[in-house]
Amino acid sequence: MNEQMQSIAASLDTFFENNADARREQIDAEPGFILYYIWTITDPDFIDQQLKMPFFRYSREEYELHLRSISQAGDKPEDLPGKLCKGCAVILYGDQVYTVAKSVAYRTRSVDTPQVEASIVGPLEAFVESMAVNLNLIRKHYQSPNLRIVKFEVGTLSHITGYMLYDSELADQAFVKRELQQIDNLNAKNAQAVSKVQQYLPKKRPLLFPRTVVTERPDRVSEALSKGKSAYLIETTPFASLAPINFHDFMASMDDSYMLPVYSYFLIALRYFALFATVVLPGAYVAFTAFNPEVFRVQLALSIAGSRAGLPYPAFLEVAFMMIMTELLVEASLRVPKTIGPAATTVGGLILGEAASQANLVSDIMIIVVASVAIANFVIPINTMSLTVRVLKYVLLFLGTIAGFFGLTVGIVLLVSYLFTMHDGKYSLVQSYTAPVKFNTGRAPKSPAGGGQA
Amino acid sequence: MNILFYIAMLTYYMINNALFNAPNVIARNYLHHGLTAIPIGLALAGINAWLLLSVYNRFPKWTMIEINRHLCGKFFGGAISASYAALMIIIGFFMFRGSLEVIIEFLMPDTPVWFLAILLITIPLFGLLHNDSTILYLVAFFTAIAFILMLIIFWLGFKEIDPVMLKGVAVHGWKPPTVQGISASLFVCGGYVGLAIWNPFFARTSLKATLLLFVSVGLVAMSCGTIIPLAVWGPWAIRNLNLIWVMTAETLSLDLFVMERGLFLIVPLLLITGYMGVLLYIYKGYRMLDLLLNKPKATRIIIGCVLAGYVVLALSVNELKVIIRYREQYMVVWAVLQNIVGILWYALAKRKERGVSAP
C-alpha cells in the first residue's frame, strides 16, 4: 500500500472508532486488501461470496477484474464515510479504492395491502419503505418508455435518497425542472417522510391546504403520470407525492375510475356532500340554535329547543365539548395499541353518546350532529385533506358562534375564496390541470403606443 | 380564458341588479314611469356593449387603462380611468351597506353594526389575495349557486302572483320611463364593464354571446325581478317597501323539508350576491388603481383606507331610503358616463384607424 492508501485507511479507521456495527477486515497484508463495511446495512452473503471468497479462488489479475466488474473506482476519500453509511462496501486493494454499492441490504417489509387508501375493486398493493420495491411497483403499473426517473437527495443531515418520476412526453417540463430545482434548494435538516418534503417545496409553506396528494397506491401514481403529473418518492417512506394537483384530486378515490360511471359519480357527489357537512354542520348547529332558529320550520325549531331544554350552558360550549371529545377519541384510537383500540373507542363512544346525553350534558340532536360530522370526515379519501377539514370546521364553528348564520356564510365565502387563491406555479388548486391559469397581465406600459393593438 | 367565465361575470351582474337594484327603482313608480324602462335600457346596453366591445376587441391585449391612454391621451384618459375606479369603489359601498342592512334587519338585529361591518369587510380584504383569473373562477362558482337560487325564487314567486295585480301591471306599466328607470335597467346588463380589467383574458369578446345573454338571462331576470313583486304586492303597497325582493320572499310559502319561509331562500342569495358584489367592485377598483398608479404598495394602502372608510361610513349612513336614493343617482351618473365613453372610444378608435391607414 502506498502512502495515500494508508492515509485513507487511517481516516476510515478513525471514522469506525465509535461505530459499533462497522467492520474492518484485513483480508491480506500483501499486496494489501482491507474491507470496510457496516454489517447492519449490508448483505453478509454478498460480502462473503462476492468479495471475500473470490479473493482466495482467483489470481490477483482475475480478482482485480472481478472487483472492477462489481464496483466503481475513483470516489474521493472524503466521500467514503458517506458511501459506507449508505450500505456500500469499501475495499482498499493494492493502490486502488473500490466502492461496491451492490452490498447494500436495507431491511424492509414485503408489499402489503393499502392501509390508508383502501380499494374495493382496485389493486391491493401499496408502497413500502424500499425504493427498489416502490419503483418496481410503479414500473409494473406504468410500462411506458417515456417514464423518466431522476435521483435526488434530501435532508442536509439525513441525506435520504429520493426519486422524481414523470412522463417525458406528457409532463410539463418547466414544472418538472422547477420542482427539481426546489428539491435541490430544499433546506430541511432531516426529511424522513415525503409529507414533510412536500411542505418545503413551494416558495411559501402551505398553512392549511396541502399542495400535493400523498398516496400509498402505485395505481394512483400511474394514473397521475399518465395525466402528465410528476411523482416523487423518498427512500424512508411508503408514500409518493403527486404534483401539480387540483382540489378534486383530494376527493377522488382510485375506485372511481374502476367502477361504472353512475356509481362513481354518485360516490363523488356523496364525498362532496360529506365535505360540506363536516365543515359546516358544527357551525350551523350553533348558528341556528343560538342565533337564527327562525330559519327552520316551527316543529323542527321546537324539537331542537326541547332537546336542549335541560342543558346548563350555551350551544357553542356544547358543540366545542363534544367536538373536542370526538377528536380525542379519534386521536386515541390512532395511537393506542391495536389490541386495545376497539375497547377504547367503544368505551369512549358509549360515554360520549349515551351517558353524556342522559346526564343532560349534551342534547340528543348534538350527538347526531357530532356523529355525522365524524363519519363524514372519514369519507374524504386523502388523509391530508381529511386532516385539513378536521381543523376547518373549528374556523366555521368560531364564526358561527360570534355571528350566527351571517358569520357562517362569511366563513364559507372566505374559505372558498382562500382556496381559489391557492396555486402551485401556474397550476391552481381549483382549476383543471390541462388548463393552466393565466395570470395578471402585468403593469400598465409607460407609453401607450405599442403591441396592444390587434 | 374560457367564455364561460365571461358569461358567469355578466350573469352575476344580471342576477344581482335584476333582483336587488332595478326593482326598487322601476317597481316603485311603475304607474307613472312604466316598465318600458326595461326594453329601452336593454337596447341602450346592447348599443353600448357593441361600441365598447368593438374597441376592446381592437386592442385585445390591453385593459381599459391602456386603451384610455392610447385613445384619449395621458391626462384625459387617466381622468376617465380614475373616474371609473372611483365609480367602482362607490358602488362597492352601496353593495356593502345594502348587504349590511339585510344582515342587521333579518339576521343579527341585536349585534353592534360596527362588528358586523368589520366582519363583512374581511371578504373584500381577502379579495386582495386574488389575481385576475382566480377571482373570475370564484365569481363563476358563486354565480352558479346564485343562479339556481334565483330560479327557485322565481318559481315560488310565480305561484304567489295575484292575477288582478298582474293585470294592473300589464295595463299601467307601459308609459314613458324615467332616466332613473332606464339607468337601472341598463345597469342590470352592465357586466361587460368588467372588461376594463379582464379584456386581455376574454378578447376577442363575442358580441353575439353578449347580446344573447342580455336577451336570455338579462331580460328574463329583469322582467321577472320587477313584475313578480309588482304582481304580488300591487302598486300602492310596493311604494313603501325598501327591500322589495326580501319582503316579497317573506310572503312566499314553501314546504322545503326543514324550511317554511321563503325569506331564508332569498337571504342566502342576497348574501352571496352581496359578498361577491363587494368583492368584485373593490377588486376592480383596486386593479384599476394598481394599473393606473403602477405603485402596488400605495394602491393597497388606498384600498385599505377605502375599506376602513366603508366601515366608518356604514355607521353614519344608516337610513336605507337615503342609500337607495343615492344609488339611483349613482346609476344615472354611471349610465351617462358609460354611454359617453362608449361613443367617445368608438369615434376616437375609428379616427386613429383612419390615421394609421392613411398614406
Image (spheres, grey):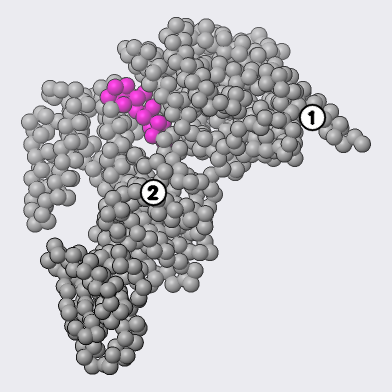
Find disc 2 in the rendering and name its residue: A201
| Above or below, comparing residue A362 to residue A230 in the picture | above
Say whether residue B307 is left or right of residue B109: right
Q: Is residue B184 visible?
A: no
Q: Quadrant of the N terminus of chain B?
A: top right
Q: Between residues B154 and A275, which one lies in front from this camera angle?
A: A275
State the image coordinates of residue B16 (x, y, percent, origin top left): 54, 25
Q: Quadrant of the C terminus of chain B?
A: top right
Q: Write the start and end of the magenta stretch as one range.
A: A399-416
Say whether residue A281 is left or right of residue B291: left
In the displayed image of the protein, which residue is found farthest to the right? B359
Q: Between residues B101 and A38, which one lies in front from this camera angle?
A: A38
Find disc 1 in the rendering and name its residue: B349
The verdict on residue A400 being magenta is yes
- Residue occupying the point 14% across, 30% down: A362
- Residue occupying the point 67% across, 38% down: B61
- Local crowd size for mark 2, using a 10 Å CA cut-off: few (<14), some (14–19), many (≥20): many
* Chain at tag 1: B
- Residue occupying the point 17% across, 40% down: A326
State the image coordinates of residue A47 (x, y, percent, origin top left): 21, 80
Q: Does the CB distance between marks 2 and 1 fall below 8 Å?
A: no
Say whether residue B86 is left or right of residue A154: right
Give the main secondary structure of the magenta stretch: helix
